[in-house]
Amino acid sequence: MRIAITERITDILVSHEIIIAENRNLYTYGLQQGLLMIFNIATILGIGIVLNMVWESIVFLLTFVPLRSNAGGYHAKTQLRCYLYSVAMITATLICIQIIPWTSAVCLTMSLGAGTIIFFLAPVEAVNKPLGQVERAVYKKRTRFSLVLFVFLVLLFCYIGQLAISVCIMMGVVVVSIVLVLGRVSK
């Protein structure tokens, strides 16, 4: 169903000469990936709604997505497995945010520990998409920049008494560090 929709959209774009026919497959693939991303974000927000943790899921995503995109890590073998693992991961993360009695000291310690793992391991390339030397350097630099920003935000929000925000950011950093370790050991 999804493929048919993206192919129809691509056909419309070609017929209106918005894209050239030779790039049809590229645009169809891009549309499929875009729809998957929208579906995944909607699922995560849905989980946030069910758990009454919408803003927490958004803050977590705003940390997790940029870090994960640049740091790499474990990749499931199929899109369905990726989706199911993601649903389980976000659910477990939000439940941890909700039920664990967090303190600033624990939040800062976990941020620094997970941040150290990310700093030294990233980027962890996927088996089916090895990185060249230049790509590796670019992703390492982006990851470290994002990491420093997020750890700083954890510190800042702890300092100004917004522990709940710090915990959501910290959990994004922690989950990325776990995904990196899993990616490294699964090679």
Image (tube, rainbow, N blue to C red):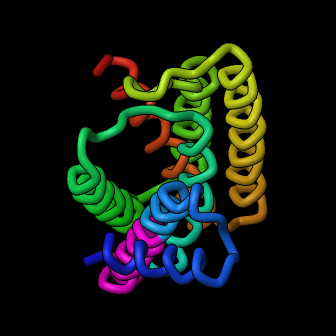
Q: Residue at x 25, y 78 (%)?
A: 1
Which of 45 and 82 lies nearest the eye of the viewer? Answer: 82
Q: Main secondary structure of the magenta part?
A: helix
Which of the 4 image quarters holds residue 84? Answer: bottom left
Vertical arrangement, residue 46 with respect to residue 159, above or below: below
Look at 70% across and 48% down and name the residue there: 150
Q: Is residue 137 visible?
A: yes
Do we see residue 163 in this rendering? no
Q: Nearer the viewer, residue 26 or 166?
A: 26
> Is 83 located above or below residue 59 in the figure?
above
Which x, y percent locates residue 163? 61, 63
84 above or below 15? above
Whether residue 185 sits left or right of residue 161 in the image: it is left
Residue found at x 58% / y 25%? 122
Horizontal side of residue 6 vs 155, given as left or right = left
Q: Nearer the viewer, residue 70 or 153?
A: 70
Which of the 4 image quadrants contains residue 27?
A: bottom right
* Residue 79 located within the stretch drawn in magenta: no
Image height of 135 relative to 179, above or below:
above
Q: Position of residue 186 (x, y in %)?
A: 28, 21
Q: Quadrant of the C terminus?
A: top left
Residue at horizontal 36%, vertical 57%? 93
Report which quarter residue 40 is drawn in: bottom left
Residue 55: give x, y in percent of width and height: 54, 78
Chain part drawn in magenta: 35-52
Percent across and percent down for residue 171 are: 49, 51
